[in-house]
Amino acid sequence: MSIVGYCIMIGILAFSIGLLLLFVPDALKKFNEFTAKMIARIDVVTFKYRIGFGVSLLIAAAFLFFMAYYFSKRY
């Protein structure tokens, strides 16, 4: 997979988690409890500052989408 594909995949992941943190944090908490045994727990601090983390993830996703667009046009 190329760098464009990785940027798009990580961007989609960051975008979706950012939206969940901003609009439906309870669903993300339930998902966290479900996956805590398999993967890792999302820190309590993340939920305490969910607005900041959510906006930061949305900005990171926008940057990754821009990088994917830039690399696809440049190379």
Image (cartoon, helix red, strand yellow):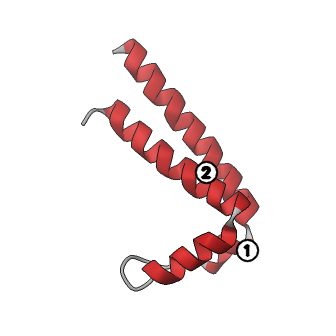
Residue 44: image x %, image y %? 64, 79
| Residue 14 to residue 64: above or below | below
| Residue 53 to residue 14: above or below | below
In the image, what residue occupies the spot 73% across and 74% down? Answer: 48
Q: Amino acid at mark 1?
A: Lys
Q: Is residue 24 left or right of residue 9?
A: right
Residue 25: image x %, image y %? 68, 69
SS at badge 2: helix
Disc 2: CA contacts within 10 A as few (<14), some (14-19) or many (>=20):
many
SS at badge 1: helix
Which corner quadrant holds the C terminus? Answer: top left
Q: Is residue 3 left or right of residue 17?
A: left
Q: Which residue is mark 2?
A: 57
Q: Which residue is mark 1?
A: 48
In the image, what residue occupies the spot 39% across and 20% down? Answer: 72
In the image, what residue occupies the spot 64% across and 42% down? Answer: 59
Disc 1: CA contacts within 10 A as few (<14), some (14-19) or many (>=20):
few
